[in-house]
């Protein structure tokens, strides 16, 4: 499948227009074009004008996918839709959206629960969206809301938007909306859905909330704005019926009265940098507030205003009521020197809360002197301002604070911080109806322990030694084994979720073995121990300790917050710590695992739909389009998740990829026709990439023309060049999300897009690790390690010499550093040279057009496969000379054998082709032998260098966990795994029984009997063949005592044959030491004879 984005301007789509009779002589109306059919009668008389000059810009998202069933073999479907869809999740309001700066006539109205596409109205304006709600059943032209600030709809996540009400309206209206930008499923990360929902005016469940637990009124506004043009007009007094604005200036900020809770949202959700090429402001910069104890642009407001950020929990701010000189006067401000208003940022489930409370501050001498100086500098005789609604509230709050200070009811700063952070022991005003005065009382939560919940707390701790999963395809044949070791689970939770719950999952080891025949890499996936050792720098003194305290493969820790009243699942922290991974795969293994997974998907699909799916039926395109249209509502019904912190640590992947080897005829007969065709197609390079179903192969293709032969040769060379690398280092950065709202599907979509982007960023490193180029990245990495050791080892030796006063450590450090540099340089150059010559040899083998020769060369035991044992230089020269001689012999003998083989198959035409192949092989095969000799010599040089250093090569070279599973009988039935049977089946593939189904085996001590469904084979303890008999030649099998030359008798199994053997014998005798052994062997042989009879 393929996904992408198209950006098309409306002016590039010329519309045929004509002028009406009333507009003759006037310019063409390009905004309302008239379309004229080409074959209409009036088309000849139409007056044509210029094309459409609209400034609209259309961003489209396209997807190319494979149709289901047989139609997918030939057909693809292209779906084009708007990149942006806007959804209204509000149940109370309609929603209008438009591009910021454009006229209101371009706004789009969305009904409750509706979804519409969105395009940019004018490319000359910023690509930002703004929104405003509209009351249902009201005229849209008289909306009672102002437009929100413009925000970027490509920034994923939730953004709070401040919605200002019209100053002419007296309704109680919502003050904020939540904009949620998500990736639309099924679009490959290109489609975006923007949804809107209003927040409660009390701030419950909102993204951000401000709580005033003091008797003082507090003004606040978003910081960083030169002016606040969308701030509310003077607000009516909600208590006394008088003006609380204090000024007609709209820049004074918003007011929060005592004991009030309000949501906070952004008036300016997007702010571009001041200078050219400056990045836009981050959310951390946008979430900065100016808070004060008076209207912000008044004199007292300027004196008392401070800035606090909502992005970090624990941020604090202290406001001084003693700075309100204009509103309070000399006497009250002097009495308030020991009072401060403390604001602290905390959390309430998914809501970030800025909570204000009172605290007592010790009055110092310098503070008192500074206050006196400030009084005299500000005004000679400061008197309280004239009485008004806002001034009375400020003065009443000051008197309450002074009374609490005199009664020693104010907590210290440390106590106030704790109480405000946890919401305990806060002050709330209560009215005294008897005397009309207002006093503050302290509601200490510690005295409310009568509501304590006596709930059960459960702890779970489970540890498993390991889990092993065997993957068997439909042949049947075991293709892979997955093993999990040292799995531990620990959890602690409360029955009513009234306390924090925590869980930890740890996987000590994960290994996936490749059990496909002729696998280049026996282990497909396991932790990269070499990379971990390099990171940790484990010394010889700490090896034992490191072995006992090994780093786990994967660790997952989660902490759940108590159940929140909003119903949103809140996770305080989620931490995922993967280890470095080594992956070594061949393409045949990837193809077979992929087909196994697709088979599982088809099975579950048929089970879900009753197995009535018909692959011959044309796909239901209407249903497909409906599913795509429904993707805009994805996540509406999903459970919301809030992550206070989600962290995925970075990891490194060492990737080794190689094409597959072709199967032998014996292996192909066991694996089945499909598996053999996959291996052959991969070896030929018949790959299909990007068809919507992942990686696929073209099975059964033949090259019938000369052009097809040339194309096939170069295709095989290209696949071998681009899909073969050894130890490519891919770095994947971590993920850090803070205060993140999401759903499960949206989180998966985000993480998938994140790691796909990182994979694309690693493409240069992947290309630099290809064997076709000699793995230059590996060479540079090795040289870097050598230079690092050349510098660091002498420094370490010098430090140790200083500590122990022994200069010999300096010399040892210099020697180690120099040796490491030499080893990495020589070994790296030798390794790159061997990769280049090996790639050249393999590609030249393709040019011989002799498939049998190429397959024999693949199946030969190559020196690189044995490199794990550190081949020496001498062994490399010996192997190189043999391969050079073999190449010359193959070239000379091919001149004779190829024409004879061609004449046997196709007569004169085959003889002519054989002569051409033989002459071509005579020229190419000796060159291949020379290149193979150079490869082995370079491998020997590298092995000798690394043997002296004890180093190891990059890649996965671990042993498999166990031999491949044995499948029994002609039907290849599955049974419980037995190590002895698996070992016997593996041994059988190396004998003349290879290619036959395994039946059983019998260990006779010094001999081993192997039984296939066709023949019986007896081997000695050295692997020598003692007896081979076909079951169809056995007439009968009996147990008798056979006399020995010394006069004693021993038990034996007599095999009566239907026809004499070449030596004239009609009976074969197998001597057994015990009667039980003879009985068991006879029983198994009779079982084999019975299988042959049933087959016939």
Image: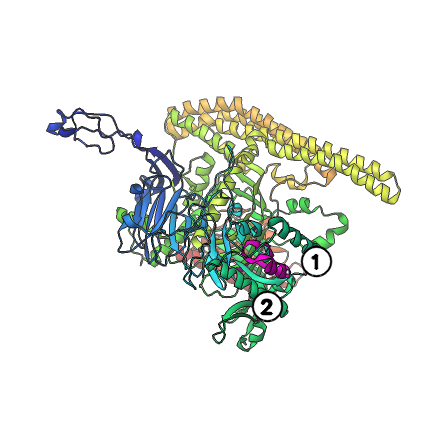
Among numbered discs 2 and 1, the one appearing first in the sequence: 1
Count numbered badges in the picture: 2
Which of the 4 quarters of the picture holds residue 154? Answer: top left
**Helix, strand or loop at disc 1?**
loop
Which quarter of the rendered picture does the N terminus lie within?
Answer: top left
> What whole-number distance in Å separates the C-alpha atoms at marks 2 and 1?
20 Å
The percent coordinates of residue 515 (x first, y second) are: 52, 49
Q: Indicate the secondary structure of the residue bearing disc 2.
A: helix
Residue range (magenta):
322-349
Q: How far across and down, in percent of the image, does residue 1057 sit?
A: 48, 54
Give the number of the disc on residue 364. Answer: 1
User: What residue does disc 2 label?
Assistant: 403
Q: Position of residue 370 (x, y in %)?
A: 67, 52
Q: How crowded is the residue under tag 2: few (<14 C-alpha within 10 Å), some, or many (20+)?
A: some
What colouring method underlies this structural image?
rainbow
Magenta-drawn stretch contains 166: no
């Amino acid at each position: 499948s393929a996904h992408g984005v198209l950006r098309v301007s409306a002016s590039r789509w010329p519309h045929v227009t004509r002028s009406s009779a009333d507009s003759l002589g006037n310019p063409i109306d390009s905004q309302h074009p008239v379309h004229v059919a080409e074959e209409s009668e009036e088309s000849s008389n139409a007056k044509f004008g210029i094309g459409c000059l609209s400034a609209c810009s259309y961003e489209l998202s396209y997807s190319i996918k494979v149709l289901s069933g047989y139609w997918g073999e030939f057909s693809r479907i292209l779906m084009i839709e708007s990149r942006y869809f806007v959804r209204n999740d509000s149940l109370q309001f309609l929603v209008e959206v438009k591009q910021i700066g454009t006229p209101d006539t371009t706004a789009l109205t969305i009904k409750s629960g509706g979804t519409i596409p969105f395009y940019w109205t004018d490319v000359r304006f910023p690509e930002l969206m703004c929104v405003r709600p509209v009351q249902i059943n009201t005229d849209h032209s008289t909306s009672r809301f102002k437009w929100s600030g413009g925000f970027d709809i490509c920034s994923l996540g939730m953004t709070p938007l401040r919605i200002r009400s019209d100053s002419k309206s007296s309704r109680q209206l919502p003050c904020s909306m939540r904009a949620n930008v998500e990736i639309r499923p099924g679009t490959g990360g290109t489609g975006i859905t923007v949804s809107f929902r209003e927040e409660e005016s009390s701030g419950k469940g909102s993204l951000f909330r401000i709580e005033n637990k003091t008797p003082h009124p507090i003004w606040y506004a978003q910081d960083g704005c030169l002016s606040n043009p969308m701030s509310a007009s003077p607000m009516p007094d909600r208590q006394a019926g008088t003006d609380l604005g204090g000024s007609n200036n709209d820049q004074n900020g918003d007011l929060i009265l005592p004991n009030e809770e309000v949501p906070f949202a952004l008036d300016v959700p997007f702010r571009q940098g001041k200078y050219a090429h400056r990045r836009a402001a981050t959310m951390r910069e946008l979430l900065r507030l100016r808070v004060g104890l008076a209207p912000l642009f008044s004199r007292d407001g300027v004196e008392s205003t401070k800035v606090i950020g909502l992005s970090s929990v624990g941020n604090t701010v202290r406001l001084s009521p003693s700075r309100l000189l204009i509103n309070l006067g000399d006497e009250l401000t002097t009495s308030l020197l020991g009072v401060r208003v403390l604001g602290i940022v905390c959390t309430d489930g998914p809501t970030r809360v800025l909570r204000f409370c009172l605290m007592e501050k010790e009055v110092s001498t310098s503070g008192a002197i500074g206050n006196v100086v400030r009084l005299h500098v500000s005004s000679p005789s400061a008197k309280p301002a004239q009485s008004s609604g806002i001034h009375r509230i400020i003065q009443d709050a000051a008197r309450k604070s002074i009374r609490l200070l005199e009664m020693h009811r104010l907590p210290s700063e440390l106590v106030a911080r704790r109480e405000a952070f946890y919401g305990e022991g806060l002050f709330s005003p209560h009215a005294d109806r008897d005397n009309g005065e207002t006093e503050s009382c302290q509601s200490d939560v510690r005295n409310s322990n009568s509501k304590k919940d006596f709930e059960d707390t459960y702890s779970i701790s489970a540890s498993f030694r390991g889990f092993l999963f065997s993957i068997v395809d439909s042949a049947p044949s075991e293709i892979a084994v997955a093993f999990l070791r040292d799995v531990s689970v620990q959890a602690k939770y409360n029955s009513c979720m009234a306390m924090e719950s925590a869980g930890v999952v740890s996987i000590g080891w994960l290994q996936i073995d490749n059990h496909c025949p002729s696998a280049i890499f026996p282990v497909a996936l396991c932790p990269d121990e070499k990379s971990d050792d390099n990171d940790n720098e484990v010394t010889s003194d700490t090896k034992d300790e490191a072995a006992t305290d090994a780093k786990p493969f994967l660790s997952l820790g989660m902490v759940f917050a108590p159940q929140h009243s909003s119903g949103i699942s809140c996770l305080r922290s989620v931490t995922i710590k993967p280890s470095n991974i080594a992956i070594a795969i061949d393409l045949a293994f990837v193809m077979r695992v992929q087909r196994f997974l697709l088979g599982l998907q088809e099975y579950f699909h048929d089970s879900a739909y009753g197995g009535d799916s018909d692959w011959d039926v044309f796909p239901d395109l209407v249903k497909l389009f409906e599913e795509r249209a429904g993707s805009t509502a994805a996540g509406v019904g999903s459970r919301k998740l809030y992550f206070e912190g989600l962290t995925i640590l970075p990891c490194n992947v060492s990737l080794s990829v190689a094409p597959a080897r072709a199967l032998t005829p014996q292996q192909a007969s066991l694996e089945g026709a499909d598996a053999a065709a996959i291996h052959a197609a991969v070896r030929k390079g018949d790959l299909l990439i990007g068809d919507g179903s992942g990686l696929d192969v073209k099975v059964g293709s033949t090259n019938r023309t000369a052009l097809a032969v040339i194309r096939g040769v170069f295709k095989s060379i290209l696949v071998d060049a681009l899909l073969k690398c050894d130890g490519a280092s891919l770095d994947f950065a971590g993920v850090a999300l803070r205060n993140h709202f999401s759903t499960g599907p949206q989180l998966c979509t985000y993480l998938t897009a994140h790691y796909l982007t990182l994979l694309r960023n690693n493409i240069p490193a992947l290309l630099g690790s290809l064997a076709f180029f000699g793995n230059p990245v590996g060479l540079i990495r090795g040289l870097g390690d050598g230079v690092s050791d050349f510098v660091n080892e002498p420094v370490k030796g010098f430090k140790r010499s200083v500590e122990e006063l022994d200069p010999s450590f300096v010399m040892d450090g210099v020697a180690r550093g120099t040796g490491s540099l030499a080893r990495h340089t020589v070994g790296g150059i030798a390794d790159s040279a061997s990769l280049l010559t090996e790639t050249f040899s393999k590609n030249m083998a393709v040019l011989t057009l002799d498939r049998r020769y190429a397959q024999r060369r693949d199946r030969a035991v190559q020196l690189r496969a044995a490199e794990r044992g550190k081949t020496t230089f001498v062994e490399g020269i010996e192997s190189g000379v043999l391969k050079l001689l073999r190449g010359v012999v193959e070239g000379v003998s091919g001149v004779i054998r190829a024409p004879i083989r061609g004449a046997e198959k196709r007569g004169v035409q085959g003889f002519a082709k054989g002569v051409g192949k033989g002459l071509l092989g005579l020229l190419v095969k000796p060159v291949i032998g020379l290149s193979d000799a150079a490869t082995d010599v370079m491998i020997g040089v590298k092995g000798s260098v690394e043997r002296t250093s004890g180093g190891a090569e990059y890649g996965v070279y671990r042993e498999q966990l166990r031999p491949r599973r044995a499948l029994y009988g002609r039907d290849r039935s599955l049974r419980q795994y037995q190590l002895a049977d698996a070992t016997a089946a593996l041994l059988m593939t190396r004998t003349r029984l290879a290619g036959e189904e395994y039946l059983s085996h019998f260990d006779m001590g010094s001999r081993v009997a192997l039984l296939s469904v066709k023949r019986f084979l007896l081997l000695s303890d050295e692997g020598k063949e003692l007896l081979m008999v076909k079951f169809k030649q056995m007439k009968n099998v009996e147990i008798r005592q056979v006399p020995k030359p010394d006069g004693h008798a021993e038990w034996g199994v007599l095999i009566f044959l239907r026809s004499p053997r070449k030596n004239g014998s009609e009976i074969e005798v197998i001597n057994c030491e015990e009667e039980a052994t003879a009985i068991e062997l006879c029983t198994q042989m009779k079982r084999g004879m019975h299988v042959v009879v049933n087959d016939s």
